[in-house]
Image: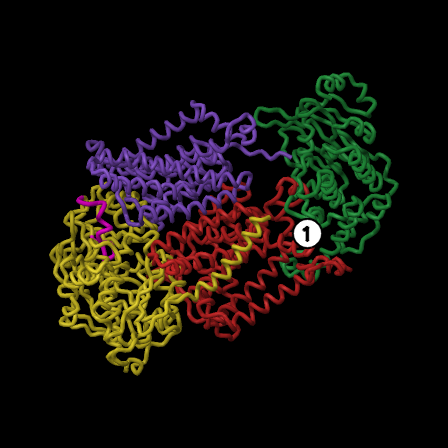
Chain colours: A green, B red, C purple, D yellow
Amino acid sequence: MTNATALRAPLPVPGDVQAANDAAPPVSSRKIGDIILDVQNISLAFGGVKALTDISFNVREHEIRAIIGPNGAGKSSMLNCINGVYQPQQGSITFRGKTFKHMNSRQVAEMGVARTFQNLALFKGMSVLDNIMTGRNLRMKSNLFWQALRWGPAEREEIAHREFVERIIDFLEIQAYRKTPVGRLPYGLQKRVDLGRALAMEPQVLLLDEPMAGMNVEEKQDMCRFILDVNDEFGTTIVLIEHDMGVVMDISDRVVVLDYGKKIGDGTPDEVRSNPEVIKAYLGTSH
Amino acid sequence: MLYRENGQFKTSYQADQQIFPISQDRLAILLLIAVAAIVVPAFASEYMFRAILIPFLILSLAALGLNILVGYCGQVSLGTGAFMAVGAYAAYNFQVRVEGMPLVASLLMGGVCATAVGVLFGIPSLRIKGLYLAVATLAAQFFADWAFLRISWFTNHSPSGSVSVGSLQAFGWRVDTPVEKYLFCLMFVVVFALLAKNLVRSAIGREWMAIRDMDVAASVIGIRPIYAKLTAFAVSSFIVGVAGALWGFVHLGSWEPAAFSIDRSFQLLFMVIIGGLGSIMGSFFGAAFIVVLPIFLNQALPAFGSLVGLSISTAAVAHTELMIFGGLIVFFLIVEPHGLARLWSIGKEKLRLWPFPH
Amino acid sequence: MGFFLETLFGGLMAGMLYSLIALGFVLIFKASGVFNFAQGAMVLFAALAMARFSEWIPEWTGIESRLVANVGAFVLAMAMMVIVAWLIEKLVLGKLVNQEGITLLMATLGITYFLDGAGQTLFGSEIYKIDVGLPKEPLFLFESTFEGGVLIGKEDLYAAGIAAALVLVLTIFFQKTGTGRALRAVADDHQAAQSIGIPLSRIWVIVWSVAGFVALVAGIIWGSKLGVQFSLSLVALKALPVVILGGLTSVPGAIIGGLIIGVGEKLSEIYLGPMLGGGIEIWFAYVLALVFLLFRPQGLFGEKIIDRV
Amino acid sequence: MKTRSLTMAVALALAAAGSLGTSIAFAQDKVQFFPSLTGRTGPVAPNATPFANGYADYMKLVNARGGINGVMTLVEECETAYATDRGVECYERLKGRHGGATVFQPLSTGITFALTEKIPNDKIPMITSGYGRSDSADGGVFKWNFPLIGHYWVAGDVVLQHIAKKEGGWDKLKGKKIAVVYHDSPFGKELLPIVQERSKMHGFEVQLLPVPAPGVEQKATWLQIRQQRPDFVIMQTWGVMTSTALKEAVATGYPRERMFGTWWSGAEPDVRDVGAAAKGYNAVMMQHGAEFEAPVVKEILEKVHGKGQGTGPREEVGSVLYMRGVVGAMLAVEGARAAQEKFGKGKPVTGEQARWGYENLNLTQAKLDGLGFKGVLRPISTSCADHMGSAWARVHTWDGSKFVWASDWLQADEQIIKPMVRASADKYAAEKKLQRRAPSDCQG
């Protein structure tokens, strides 16, 4: 995965970006660390409809954590709570020892949590390049006036970040589409851009919402490869929602199972596989 | 054959990030500006300047501003006229109240005041979306119409509530002939177009477009809607405000709130839509279309009538003009909902491939 | 106190008329997702047709009965509105399916220009008269309770009555009839409606015709109040705050919103106006709507928007 | 793709033709060109159309009479729909046509304000009889503006005089309350200074009731009037606003006899569809009223409409606003005639020469009668200092079917108005850093 290693090579960029790279964890990171994200007794409801009831689980540093469950089990809602799209009515979320009643998207992003989306939430009007560049926005500090003049710091900054994004583009093997509006790309590639946008944030925790939904086998394999690379090259912690049991069981360290907004199982793939509740839920449904 | 980008290799990101990566484009645009600045003044008639070119320039500036808000940030505003009015009246007050205030300074201060008001009326956009917001911005429109009639301080207590400005002086340059006025406006337009282009291709521009295309995703990657939207309102209303000031100072010379009525707001929105949402170039196309078309129809119809030997009454002309104007707008929306700018880029793509079909 | 009541009634009755026009907006928005700015132009167009035909019919037929003239004119005007609706569907909406709201809105503005031009070309741009026998002279209530009594324009009273009746009829039409159900189906989901075999284009023609009918009635009422001329098309601007206040998709919203705006602007003009130098009612209506929206971004009765990702 | 390239073509064609179209001109030689900015469409069409028709018809009559010492008049119209920017465009379009415009009459206060800034550079005079800037009567500052035979302050003063007369003297107005319902725009507000001046002098109370344009919504206004019960209502309204006001007055039961319009609020279109209900409504008239019996009207009917060249409907000839168009045209022509006397008979005069004509206008009663304005107008004579030339007016009232005179000739009190005009003009000059015209500028 030479592309990936390339990503970590130090970049000739201004202060904060540089710092961010130094902060990137060491290579020998592929051993599970201690709890980084801890979700306690989350409950969420829309009007009368209960989406989540009293969900608790935790995520350890550097691991790949899967959330599975039938349609409408509340998987996406869970992620939405974690990065502050929805505000749960009860429960709390602890991230790196800080506990929050509910999260605010901006904070979450600043704390290094990135996210991809189930039904692509790309910026359709923008090119692949710009979409991924938005991932760098948090790190771009030059003010309106410099940007308007596009001179001095603004330009240097722009170029520095452009270089970083180019590495991501290489990594995801989408060089050819740099300047194409994402709207025109095939589904599989859009998924990659979505991932690329998340990676551009240099996240420590990466939330993936069905990264392989609607892909053919090859595409799935590519996607798996990317995910594993990211996890094991920079030890990025990964929380992933997936339908494809095969994939989940192969790549994830621990699995949470949701059904109708309740947690019905939690543990290693094997434990989960043998859990009667889970089997019932899945046999009960179309899987 | 001449319009090709192959053979032009970008050796640095800097080069790759230019406004016009293709050298022919750069050439073309420089040529265009040169023509506008040198050739046009030499040939255009006074009528062209006063009735078409100057209004065109000023309104394309306003459309440019509006396009940042509507086209790039996706916040539909029907209150543009109000922000133009604020710009105009603010500039007027700086001019008459501050002794020896330089013209350009008061114009820009007009923009600044418009910015303040724009941000104020932008705040609801944080909660109100889409058409609701569009209609809500009409509050700004009607309030401004009222305020500039009622609060006599704004009009320096002129009994009629109509204000007028004296001769224009900028950097010791006396701007009074049509040509000078035209060049004066051109200056503003070129500079602002450049700045605007820079903004929309920088971080802030990406934030605006992100909010426009998918606000939830945008906030998840750490873009604050409040910041993105309000900056869009600020930048937009600044440009619009300056345009308003120019409209009052350079084009009309004397004006009343009616000069910035709701019709103006609609007119500008038309320019942005017909020209192309999210396209600097489009703002100019749109302005040209909306400014020239009615005047053209209004003059061409009688001429056409006399050709076929019947004299059309003034009223009939005006009515037919309305109908054709409305019809054409619908027609354009149907054949190219993405505006003239899209046609332009399609044309360019074709040209790039030419003479090969694919 | 008597005067307050007077203002209140005045506001309520004006509000009823706003509701009527707002209803036109809501119907079309529900069924075709179009924010129809042409509503005002349709009012003018319909009123012009009504006024002119009622002049012309006696000339053509030689029958000097006002009833005949008005009924005939009403029928003809309605026919014209149906034609307009049909043309709009065929030439504009049909060709603009699945465009963004803003594009559609602009298209209706184009239609506005066209109708303004067409209306004045066909029917002239003088000031015309609609006389459907609405009484003009005022009516005084509670003269015993308050000195001077409480004045109510009989005309307004009738107008409000008609408006209310129409609103009622349309609500029933929507809730009870098959077409109404089809309309609501379309409103909820175009594709779905189509897939169960509801012909979109026909529905749209119907909706726009209904809107045309509403416009015609509104045109007759306002026309006989103000006389028929160009400015009539501007009544639409009075209905906009009503629509967003009530919620773009809600018929009851249009009604309640109309009353709120009507009362709000009259009270503000009379009790606030003098302090601010008068002429505030137009922007006050919008500010009122704006404030409401800050608390309910989707309007009083509009559906709540939940972001899904 | 096909349609797209087509559209492209259309767009380009339009853009190209747009610039082309501007140079369409109707070649004519040795004519006196009178541009006419019309409001035949839009919010004020019902009122502005008769004016345009009268203007055109009188010019035709002049030609039928043999032109201005043989120089034929030529009218070209340009539609402004009462919008200022369209008005400016029309001005720019027409000013250079047919050997140059003689004089402009925009019939819109907004356009007047905008053009006031342009005419000095273009050296074209502008007649704004009864509208525009009241202070432009001061020729010392406004060299090119001519509010001939009246401006808003004259109207206001005469209305108040008439009311005072009816009440039996100015002193009777003390403590009375007069409401002013006005078009919320410069047009409407121009009236206020004189009313306030008079109220200071005679101690009557003024209640200001602005109505936002176009004025179709006046319920609140008239409820206030019903509440405040002013003794009189003065209306500075235009277009649909007037008839709406009358209807609301009917609906709130305010006596029409106590309502007084200025001369833009007292014409047939305003009362037509109110009909008998408007009986008793009064309006001050800028000298002429509805003049169906005037010789000039008879002549127009015979020589213009009689030959099937009438611009508007026949029955409109002689109506109030039609007559205002006729008077406007007559003043425009007579100015040019006066200029010919100085700069050469039988030759078209330039705008600059015409300006001299308007500044040295001397229409004696004999001259006016000769032109067919017997009983319609009084003598008019302008000067360098006075660009108005006459401050006389009359009040007429609607008897349910037609307008009849309700007062004798009344003259606005120059003692009051002149200083106001001068003060306002000086303020304008100061703002624009202009000098008053030197006396030498008034010679020749």
- Name the quadrant of the C terminus of chain D: bottom left
Please give left or right for residue B322 compared with residue D286 in the image.
right
Residue D43 in the magenta stretch? The answer is no
The residue pinned by badge 1 equals B357
Q: Position of residue C214 (x, y in %)?
A: 37, 35
Does B192 sit above or below residue C10?
below
Residue at point 31% right, 53% down? D44
Q: Is residue C258 visible?
A: no
Q: Could you say which quadrant of the image residue B158 lies in?
A: bottom left
In this orientation, which residue lies closer to the viewer: B216 or B94?
Answer: B216
In this orientation, which residue lies closer to the viewer: D408 or C20?
Answer: C20
Q: Specify start and end residues of the magenta stretch as a single range.
A: D260-276
Residue type, label 1: Pro
Q: Position of residue B177 (x, y in %)?
A: 46, 73
Does B169 sit above or below residue B219?
below
Q: Could you say which quadrant of the image residue C52 lies in?
A: top left
Label 1: chain letter: B
Q: Position of residue B310 (x, y in %)?
A: 34, 57
